[in-house]
Amino acid sequence: MSANFEDEDTPPELIDVTAIPADQTSVDEEPTARVPITLVTGYLGAGKTTLLNHILTEKHGKKIAVIMNEFGDSMDIEKPMTVNQGGQEVTEWMEVGNGCICCSVKDSGVMAIESLMERRGTFDYILLETTGLADPGNIAPIFWMDEGLGSSIYLDGIVTLVDAKNIMRLLDEPAPEEKAESHDVNHDHGSGPVLSMAHMQISHADVVILNKTDLVTDQELEAVRDRIASINSVAMIHVTNHSRTPQIEGVVLDLHAYDHLADLDFSKKGHSHIDPAISTTAIVTPSIPADKVSRVDAWLRSVLWETKFPAPVISVSSEPHPVDFEVHRLKGILNLNDGTSRIIQAVRDVFEIRDAEPIDIKDKSKSLQCKIVLIGRGLGLSAEPWQESFESYLAAK
């Protein structure tokens, strides 16, 4: 690949493919198969457009539909791809030389996705770029709440690009326009730690691409990694320069963001408070009976929908119960006594519990556990109250 693609203002070469039949289907893909979508977020200058340029030009053999936001890092790339017909913006899909297609949007990308689904079979993945100051927590739930989209696509994960050189300032000293607003209108958080949009983008991430690391020292890089992990300790961190990742599988595509929770050792993760605004906490319990899944659902509704901490019937923890809190991301795995399992994923107040892949129980030395991770603001200094709350709720009849 030529060096000029390191410049975020350099557009890929485009070829008009509007003549592609809308009903063209792939022989290898089931018509009803849902397509995975990845959100790509990060501040202006973090390297989103450079990453997408790599994907749109490298010979990786993937058929990817890339939706680039017109208010993103490079106006020159996106402008020619959106056309106006009869006073209405119409999505114009363009093909690049490696088999991928792309377009640009001025909104959350929902209309572009709806247009894209008319061409099912010409792509296997969707990448949706957000604006630099976008809160991914406002975008991701759309793919569950929109009945039409929810049956066609599923959220594979959220990828956040982080500028290693400037991230500390964005976290600690955000400009007024870089500060995040609380999504909980019932509470005033003005007296709490500063919450920036950088916090929100990291806290919602399944993968963090730590970019521009050639501009910092090894000591500075380690401090940035520690800070990111303190905000979101379950996100995978990939260190890069010029947005060049060693591969796209597992970094941008095929994230399976909710499949690796069973392998996490939460005893080593701890409950870090390096960052005063947002932290990660985890609940680990033994496997549960299948009839307790409904109790988990009710517990989640209290925490996510009502923003109420379900107080345990009897509390032995000396830690105070969280009162004023927000959960930005929640993910978990429920291993059931019958050998089946469920996956939990949530963004803000939208969540789902779905069937997971069958559990391999060949290794009898490993006990099955339920694991739930909460990432958000005001979760408290210890995981104990959350652990007690969850276990007490499950025990109630």
Image (tube, helix red, strand yellow):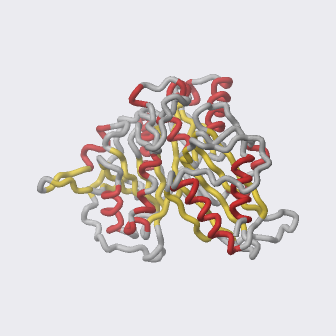
Q: Is residue 226 above or below residue 364?
A: above
Residue at 74%, 65% (x, y): give it.
Answer: 395
Residue at 17%, 54% (x, y): give it.
Answer: 88
Q: Quadrant of residue 95?
A: bottom left
- In terms of depth relative to the viewer, which is nearer, 88 or 388? 388
- In terms of depth relative to the viewer, which is nearer, 63 or 302? 302
Q: Residue furthest front?
A: 313
Left/right placement of residue 131 relative to residue 237 reads: left
Percent across and percent down for residue 86 are: 11, 56
Q: Quadrant of residue 228?
A: top right
Q: Is residue 132 above or below residue 24?
A: above
Q: Is residue 54 visible?
A: no
Quarter of the image that includes the C terminus: bottom right
Residue at 47%, 76% (x, y): give it.
Answer: 30
Residue at 52%, 54% (x, y): give it.
Answer: 306
Percent across and percent down for residue 345 are: 57, 58
Left/right placement of residue 86 relative to residue 188 reads: left
Percent across and percent down for residue 243 are: 51, 39
